[in-house]
Image: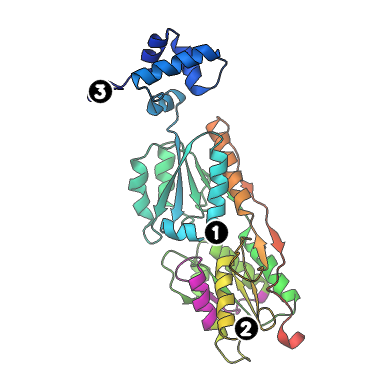
Amino acid sequence: MVAHGQARPTLRDVADRAGVSVSTASLVFSGKGPVATATAERVRAAADELGFTGPNPLASSLRQGRAGAVGVLVEGRLQAAFRDPFAVAVLDGLAEELERVPTGMLLLAQPSDDVEAVVPQLAGLALDAVVFSLCGPGDHPAVDHLAARGIPMFSTGVPADRRVTQVRIDERAAFAEVSRHVRALGHRRVASVAMPLGPMGEPGPIREERVREADVQIPSIGRVLGFRDVFGPGAPVVQTGDGSSVEGGIALGRALLDVPAAERPTAIVAQSDVIAAGVIVAAEELGLQVPADVSVTGFDGVDLPWLPHRITTMDQQGRERGRLIGTLVRRRLDGTRPRSTNSPVALRAGTTTAPPPEAG
């Protein structure tokens, strides 16, 4: 073993002790080449005697010209991100692809009310690439910083900058398709529950000027516009104050449904499956049946085993989307320059939509 204060043994020390070349010792530890069993055993025995635990990862990364880590920005607190099954699915697919590099994945929480705060964090990190995962405004202050350092950037749609390779969907068209499904069932008194339209969103009804002034690249804005394309500019839209959460869906579901029957929407189109689940919980707590009394749709296509309904939703195929981003990152690290691409979506009918009561 290495005594306290003694220099860390090197691969050359191991090679000298085993009586082999440095390249042969390196092949034993990397497993990337054929080495005779007896020779490999001699190298490992020498390593044990010297207390050598493996090649220096920093030196290895410098030789390869890589830092060995990809930064992944997640909006808000990491705790909130891990409660969102769609965000988790995207991260899972991304991690699966990055394991093939191989490289590490460093998660960074970006405060939703202070996007500038992440720049000093990034400044102190050596990164091979950065992924904006469901994260931030259309115009992100970290983009200029990362571009100046020559760090490749990837995102799921935002920030919307030509220097960022995108894996996106047409938010407006996809949400309009869900809305048309509801309209085709006969619903006319319909409301939508949106994610915040910006970092400082307050829960409750959104103002028309807020929609007009907002960055159309933000997913929640695109989805509001898709809803309005189908049900008109006067159709009510309310937003949560905490992103995509069951609690936000419950609160706004109660606000929309705890009214006289003649004023109550017969359908609620939610911007995420998690929000939709909250709306369903609120409806049932009020004694309403889904979908007999009120239809509810979501967006994302995640599985919610605790919910006794299969939500009608737009399936974004989160894990596949994460894999697609990871594939583009791998290509970039291999020296190619991949282009932005679109991610597939598909309407998935469930058990939470039906014709409105008066059409039965």
* Residue 156 visible in rendering: no
Q: Residues within 10 Å of mark 3 (few under 14, many from 20)?
A: few
Q: Nearer the viewer, residue 201 or 73?
A: 73
Q: Residues within 10 Å of mark 2 (few under 14, many from 20)?
A: many
Does dot 3 land on a helix, a strand or a loop? loop
The mark lying in front, picked from 2 and 3, is: 3
Q: Residue under circle 1? A: 85
The mark lying in front, picked from 1 and 2, is: 1
Q: Which mark is residue 201?
A: none
User: Residue 309, how many percent across, how many down?
Assistant: 65, 71
Q: Nearer the viewer, residue 141 or 335?
A: 335
Residue lying at 56% horizontally and 89% vertically, measured from the top left:
259
Query: Which amino acid type corresponds to the residue marked 3 in the rendered image?
Result: Ala
Q: Which mark is residue 3?
A: 3
The numbered mark, 2 or 3, whose residue comes first in the sequence reads 3
Q: Residue under circle 2? A: 265
Does dot 2 land on a helix, a strand or a loop? loop
The numbered mark, 1 or 2, whose residue comes first in the sequence reads 1
* Residue 274 visible in rendering: yes
User: Residue 317, how many percent across, how many down?
Assistant: 64, 54
Residue segment shown in magenta: 231-255
Please say if the residues under marks 3 and 1 sit with CB atoms less than 8 Å apart.
no
Query: Which amino acid type corresponds to the residue marked 2 in the rendered image?
Result: Pro
